[in-house]
Image: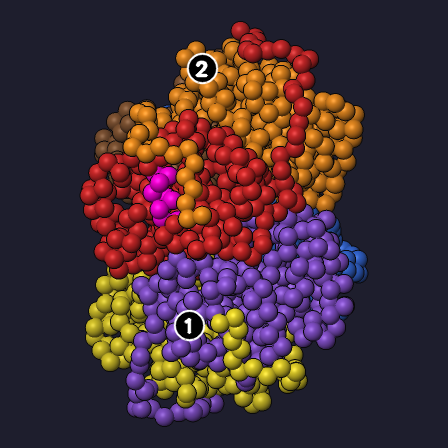
Chain colours: A blue, B brown, C orange, D red, E purple, F yellow
């Protein structure tokens, strides 16, 4: 089976890191490939960054469909364009936040999330809520470091993450920790060891769930919401207005 | 004050219809303009269509910011890119679904939504839920006509809408009806008259709420989530992989 | 259009303050009037105070209906008698809490509320929840000052409000603040300036939303729940018991 | 112990009916009395009726406090003024809707409510939701008969109730039925017999729960929300405006 | 009427304590008996302990049914096997957590729970949520003492409980406290006196609610979910596999 | 890796069926074994059946731990004893309902469940709600056939299932169907083919998710709730009461 990781941002080192995390756990029989668009933001920090990344991400999925890819992992914790991607793909599309949440709800009763920037906190809270895990998620914490700061200053990143996880254990009574950014993937094992609490990296979780779904023969339902987008003709040319201004 | 309607799809006749709806209710002192991107899908039917429309919609907002626009209305009922738009804009950005829901929750205790295609039903249910109106929304119904069918066959559209609204009155005990597509805007008054129940067009609702917010001096909070997107440099060039394939 | 503010308590200086806040933002073409009953509690601090104020408030609405008032603003943050008022009125009736919450959900992703007395905290939490904003509201805080204390000791009130808002910014990561008492209305701009976070006064918000709804032609739905109260005859006189005592 | 039923409407025959229902189940040692205000609506059909009934209902509670009443039952299914009454009373105040819901959640997993008028359906749905039973309540049905119609045409009422309960059994798979109006109290046993499903009358339920709470020594918490209303002086006389009109 | 307390664990001193709490408040006409299985865990600390206790607890209910017991109280705060017990019993089965929550929602607007071990916190949160009280419950706190520690070191237990309740009053603004363990029952009055906040012991609450339900004639609904378990024959003997191992 | 299916009921043919379903999708490297206790009910139809099955199911897990089993699948759709099993096991324990729900939320936006007996409907609704999928689950339907009826009359079972799934497609607009009973496992592919909608069998889903979690190295968190049960000594022998009766 062929699973493709798509890092929606254009920072190839993050794509590489995600690929490495995936390869560490992939089955021998699984072919894993990883791509990133080249014109999207260098990191996804907020909803506008997400929006700018999604069309090129969908192009990657269309490309993957032509190549016979069996399932996709969207390697960005905000799960940008997840519903859209599922409309475009035939096989399963796994978001790393949703995958991590599903794992956390299976191996613990309460978890917390640790992410990079405070501005991502409400975004993550909203998708965790939409995935039905609002009751099980104690808190979403931010270490207040930009996404690329994880690569630029890994020592500071690791120190801040350990401190935040320790606080989440103590004050949230978190029983598992979800890493709220694909760029934290390579720190996962070290953080688990340092803190003694299960730490869940979404890339790892998503890759294994993708394998599971393909292995069981599940594909994205094409009944109703996730059906392929309808092919539509060009816009009716009856009017012509790049900018319509009125009553001024 | 200057309010700009942005129709995220590229069908100018729909932009025109939205503008007409807005002008019918705008204050004399309000300058209303309307635009649509030209490269986006001709209609928004599902999450993939949404995703393809948002970046150009954000460009329109950036253009509006340079022109001193005070507030924006996103004239598509799925409220595509609403959070992203709010990060980019200084003034308020109003989604027509959220606006219609807020009006419905003010003038009734229970409402139903009538939209075009069945595939949009879960999308609308999800945003209605996210806006906190899940408990107040009796149901989202679809007349099973494509968005552009509203313009191509207005008689059928109107007939199906009247029938669906009558059923919602009877079986849902809906006290107000929200039109779940910007392209139904021009039918609003006729539907209200035909069915005797308040019918809410999101474009109208959003325009008036935009006026209200600008009039009161409210702008989008730039504290945390809706702060402007951070300017980021180019991606680190340390790696170079359009397609990384491994363990295959 | 004629919009009437009704301050449900009998403290005319608070009515005046609300009127001033409304006039600061009202459209030139809007006629704003303000009234308060004279026999109701001097301030609304809890559910019993609310209950005692509502019948006279409904009388004011009946009076307004005879005078052709187009919409009403209930200028008390607990939104007392909001559903009842909507049954009585033909035009829209806006509660200042619901209006403030709708604005907050439009210009921010997370907000906190700051009110006067701790006893009002659960009351406000419950209506915020009923308005569907429980997920978006970080916390409701009390400065522990009676309502009339806002007028009697404005320096202390302002100091306590600034301190509480600063804490809400820091610990709640609140992106907007709602003032949880009509009596705080006049402090709104000073608080926003002092703290750098958008501060929403419900009176202002409600007035503008009332204008918006009237401007769009929306009236309260008379289908089902908000229909006018049925006129009923006198009670059946078949029994006669001011106090029935039994089995004692 | 002395438990007082307060029927908030002014129809003494309904007060009598409630008293009879209570006496059928009261412990021998319980003194039950029943009162109704004389100036309130003859029936409670909607939120405005509720609002008009509550102040006089609170007066009855104040009177009861002077007489040493131990607990109160509010004998109207909308539980009007329940929070207010709890602020005024020292002992427990039981709403018949909340009591019926608590019984239903104890003896069944899913229940439905059958009430009189359709306009009460959203009101009941909202309080059932606020009591935390939204998930357990299959539906609220209305037989479309005014409250006093229960007394005026008991045969029709009983027939409509049996039909509605049978449908709730079949289509809702309701495991218990709550009678959504105090005026249905006397029909409870006949309906249970006719339909073979447990039927819960709120008056009965509330009386027994009131006995239970008094018997265990529970009183209403006076910590925070339900504390007695603060005694406040007259309104500050610094302004004088029965009707303030401005900018017109 | 005959009400039987069943302590699911095998520690008879706890059974005795529960019986004493019940007898303090039982009506003179109520026959209260108390039992505990003898092979179950000595205390219920977590879901596995619960599971091991339930079958013998159900046997006690079957025994009670043969003896004509009218209602049962499950005297363990996790309400283990509550749904199962209701399937087996004809009369009402009351869980002490559910009973305490119902009382707390009647005499206060917000409550907190104080239990023994941290591992029980998510269990209690989950059932409080399932009972519909998630919104009304401020927090579940643990004093970090094993269940039997309550008996072994009552001074420490009482000191920790007082401290925790004081914190809940101050920081949660809890208006009532629920004791989250049957073994705290005998401390209830002392804790209430020491802290000045209503303290609810579930055993007491459940006994009184059981009396109330029996007194009103309510029995467990046998329509659908709580119907008696179907008598089933032995397993089909067509296969025979204590351990099936395959593809290894 | 070694994954063990535990069928909590004692019907070996159902264990066999589950094993076959698992083997059809298991990775070549996965050792799958299947067991069932011999003294538990022949089928799980309701909460009492569940309760009686769990202790022996936990014994099977303890046995599995000694044999080095890596993960467990509980092959009964009510997920009986899931939390308890996770306390006892070191590796992941997967419930087939939770697994099916997670798959359904990944490949569709809305799903329905089809189970055997009506009495299981509220049980399944409650766990689906607890897993956070209440919003995504359209309905739980029952074909009104006992669990063992699936084996005794497979033609009728299949016909009823096809009819119910067709109705769920039409009226619920279900985009995926979950089979709500382990005993339907072998029908999964035929049902999907007959109805054209993805049909999810929980045994298959759970086996693959178990493989995924073990493959990624996830184990059950032993921090707090799912920690191993504490070893406790015998009960204090200070009292001796098989049956305490008092005040009678």
Reading the image, the residue beneath label 2 is C63
Residue A182 x/y as whole percent: 63, 59
- Residue D113: within the magenta? no
Left or right side of C118 for E69: left
> Which corner quadrant holds the N terminus of chain E?
bottom left
Mark 1 crowd level (few <14, some 14–19, many ≥20, 10 Å Cα): many
Q: Give the range drawn in magenta.
A: D14-22
**From the viewer's perspective, is residue E75 above or below residue C58?**
below
**From the viewer's perspective, is residue D83 above or below residue E63?**
above
Q: Residue at x 65, y 61 (%)?
A: E188
Q: Which residue is drawn at 42% across and 16% down?
A: C65
As measured in the structure, the alpha-carbon distance from the residue carrying label 2 to the one carrying label 1 is: 61 Å
State the residue in front, A43 or B115.
B115
The answer to whether residue E39 is visible is: yes
Q: Residue C162 carries which label?
A: none
Marks 1 and 2: in contact by CB < 8 Å? no
The answer to whether residue E102 is visible is: no
- Residue D21: within the magenta? yes
Q: Main secondary structure of the magenta part?
A: helix
Residue F26 x/y as whole percent: 45, 79
What secondary structure is found at the residue carrying circle 2?
helix
Q: Mark 2 lies on which chain?
A: C
Q: Which residue is drawn at 42% across and 76% down?
A: E64
**From the viewer's perspective, is residue A18 above or below residue D40?**
below
Left or right side of F152 for B17: right
In the image, farthest residue toward the top: D248
Q: Mark 1 lies on which chain?
A: E
Reading the image, the residue beneath label 1 is E69
Left or right side of C111 for D153: left
Q: In which quarter of the image is residue B140?
A: top left
């Amino acid at each position: 089976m062929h699973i493709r990781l798509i890092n929606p941002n254009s920072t190839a080192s993050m794509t590489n890191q995600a690929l490495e995390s995936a390869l560490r756990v992939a089955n021998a029989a699984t072919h894993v490939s990883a791509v990133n668009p080249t014109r999207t933001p260098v990191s996804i920090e907020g909803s506008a960054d997400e929006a700018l990344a999604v069309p090129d991400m969908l192009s990657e999925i269309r490309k993957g469909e032509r190549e016979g890819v069996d399932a996709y992992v969207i390697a960005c914790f905000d799960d940008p364009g997840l519903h859209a991607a599922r409309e475009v793909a035939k096989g399963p599309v796994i978001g790393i936040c949703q995958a991590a949440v599903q794992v956390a709800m299976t191996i613990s009763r309460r978890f917390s999330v640790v992410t990079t920037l405070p501005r991502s906190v409400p975004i993550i809270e909203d998708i965790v809520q939409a995935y039905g895990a609002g009751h099980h998620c104690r808190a979403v914490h931010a270490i207040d470091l930009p996404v690329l700061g994880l690569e630029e200053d890994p020592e500071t990143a690791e120190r801040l993450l350990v401190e935040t996880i320790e606080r989440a254990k103590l004050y949230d009574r978190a029983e598992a920790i979800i890493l709220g950014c694909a760029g934290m993937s390579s720190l996962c094992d070290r953080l688990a060891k340092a803190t003694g609490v299960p730490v869940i990296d979404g890339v790892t979780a998503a890759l294994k769930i993708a394998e599971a779904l393909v292995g069981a023969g599940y594909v994205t339902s094409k009944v109703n919401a996730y059906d392929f987008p309808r092919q539509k003709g060009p816009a009716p040319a009856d009017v012509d207005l790049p900018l319509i201004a009125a009553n001024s």
